[in-house]
Image: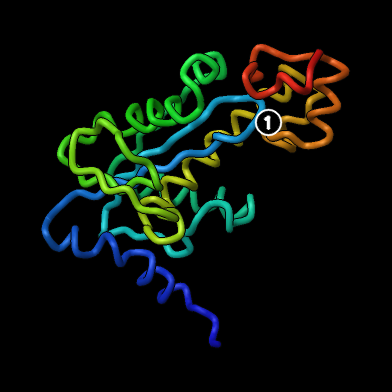
Amino acid sequence: MARETAKEKLERMTQIEKPLWEKGLRVAGIDEVGRGPLAGPVVTACVVVDPRFLVEGVDDSKKLSEKKREALYDEIVRTAAYIGIGWVEPAEIDRLNILNATKVAMEQAGSECEGCCFLVDAMEGLRLPGEVRSIVHGDALSYAIAAASIVAKVTRDRYMIELDKTYPGYGFARNKGYGTAEHIRALGELGATPVHRRTFIGKFVR
C-alpha cells in the first residue's frame, strides 16, 4: 500500500469539517490530555479552525513525536481563529472525579466560542454555547479535534516540565505525571506533593 501523502492526510482529516464549513459554520475541536496521570492537572484545548489556513501534518497528538508536536503547536497557534484552554487542578479532580473534571475543563475551553459547532473527542453531556457532536476516536478522524489534542498536550507537557523544577525527584519532566516505575518509587520514598491526585495514589503511598 502506498504511503499516504501529507495532502491526502489533510484531505482525510478534514472530511468531518468540510460539510460544516460549506454551510458557513465555525467549527471548534475540543480534546483533553491528562486523564490518567497520578499528578498534575487535566488540560483541555478548544481550537476554532480557520479553513483558509490548514496545517499539514496535524494528527492525534499520541501519534506524533515531541519535536513534531512542538512544531505543529506553533503553526496551529499562528493559524487558528481562536484557542481556548481549560484547566482543572489535582485537588478539584479529587473532589469531582476525573470524568467530571474533564467535562469542566472542556466547558472552560469552549465557553467563549458562541455559536460554534463543537467536535469533541468521545465526551457526552457538555454544556457549550453551540451544537456539540461527540466523535469516538475523534482525534484520529477530525482535524479540529487533532489540533486541539496537540495544543492540550504541549500545554500540559510544558507545565509538567516546569513542575519538575519545583518538585524534583519524581521525574515529572520525563513522565509528565504518569505512573512510571520511577514516579511510583519516588512516591514511596518522598511521599506525595500538592500536585498529586490523592484519589489516584492511595495504593502507592503510606
Q: Is residue 140 above or below residue 48?
A: below
Foreground pick, 125 / 46: 125
Q: Tell me what residue is drawn at x 61 percent, y 25 percent.
A: 40
Q: Which residue is mark 1?
A: 177
Left or right of 86 in this view: 92: right
Residue 73: x %, y % from top left: 49, 47
Q: Is residue 55 above or below residue 48?
A: below
Left or right of 171 in this view: 3: left
Q: Tell me what residue is drawn at x 40 percent, y 28 percent.
A: 105
Residue 6: x %, y % from top left: 46, 73
Left or right of 94 in this view: 28: left
Q: Amino acid at mark 1?
A: Gly
Colouring scheme applied when the structure was drawn? rainbow
Q: Tell me what residue is drawn at x 35 percent, y 34 percent.
A: 84
SS of the residue under disc 1: loop
Left or right of 98 in this view: 110: left
Foreground pick, 48 / 29: 29
Quadrant where the C terminus lies? top right
* Residue sticking out furthest to the left: 23
